[in-house]
Image: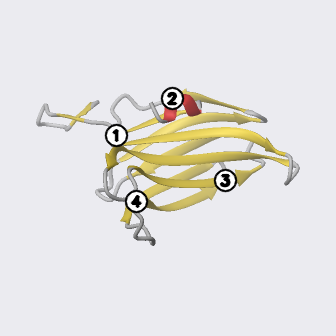
């Protein structure tokens, strides 16, 4: 949890990001999977997170812009999600997650074939970052 500057109030973690690397046998290359979810779970619909994602050089920006209601009318429950994959990422990357109110958290991750390690995480944050899928839904 982090404190809002000046108020002393602690704000909860709003999002969790999973970054994982795997070999895709069909595409014959390594893919880096990036999934963003809300901590809050919704009871009536499974929303999608609207994200403007931008990968330039060694920086991945995920700008959260809001939620989109489902296209189907089937009820469902769970967190809102956003998911994408990037081919052949390797090296040190800065991952920046920002919210509509311009708050942002910067993380450093090292991506290699089949492995992702978090090397730097902000002390005050609204997003958690994990590399293990079992921790992503915990």
Residue extending farthest to the front is 74
Sequence-first tag of 1 and 2: 1
Residue wearing tag 1: 126
Q: Image quadrant for the C terminus? A: top left
Q: Secondary structure at mark 4?
A: loop
Classed neighbour count for the residue bearing mark 2: other residues with Cα under 10 Å, few (<14), some (14–19), many (≥20) = few
Q: Secondary structure at mark 3?
A: strand
Sequence-first tag of 2 and 4: 4
Classed neighbour count for the residue bearing mark 4: other residues with Cα under 10 Å, few (<14), some (14–19), many (≥20) = many
Sequence-first tag of 1 and 4: 4
Real-space CA distance between mark 1 and mark 4, rounded to the nearest whole angstrom: 19 Å
Sequence-first tag of 2 and 3: 3
Label 3 vs label 4, nearer the camera = 4
Residue 84 percent across, percent down from the top left: 61, 55
Label 1 vs label 2, nearer the camera = 2
Real-space CA distance between mark 2 and mark 4, rounded to the nearest whole angstrom: 21 Å
Residue wearing tag 3: 85
Residue wearing tag 4: 47
Q: Are marks 2 and 3 in contact (CB under 8 Å)?
A: no
Label 1 vs label 3, nearer the camera = 3
Residue 113 percent across, percent down from the top left: 79, 35
Real-space CA distance between mark 1 and mark 3, rounded to the nearest whole angstrom: 23 Å
Residue wearing tag 2: 135
Q: Is residue 33 left or right of residue 103?
A: right
Sequence-first tag of 3 and 4: 4
Toward the viewer: 77 or 104? Answer: 77
Residue lying at 50% horizontally and 55% vertically, measured from the top left: 82
Relative to 101, say whether 133 is above or below.
above
Sequence-first tag of 1 and 3: 3
Real-space CA distance between mark 2 and mark 3, rounded to the nearest whole angstrom: 19 Å
Real-space CA distance between mark 3 and mark 4, rounded to the nearest whole angstrom: 19 Å
């Amino acid at each position: 949890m982090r404190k809002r500057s000046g108020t002393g109030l602690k704000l909860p973690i709003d999002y969790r990001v999973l970054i994982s690397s795997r070999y895709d046998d069909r595409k014959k290359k390594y893919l880096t999977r990036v999934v963003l979810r809300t901590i809050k779970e919704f009871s009536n619909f499974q929303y999608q997170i609207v994200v403007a994602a931008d990968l330039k050089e060694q920086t991945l920006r995920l700008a959260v812009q809001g939620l989109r209601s489902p296209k189907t009318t089937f009820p469902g429950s769970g967190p809102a999600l956003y998911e994408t994959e990037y081919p052949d990422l390797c090296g040190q990357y800065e991952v920046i997650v920002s919210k509509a109110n311009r708050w942002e958290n910067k993380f450093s991750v090292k991506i290699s074939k089949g492995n992702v390690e978090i090397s730097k995480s902000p002390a005050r944050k609204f997003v958690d970052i994990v590399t293990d899928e079992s921790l992503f839904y915990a």
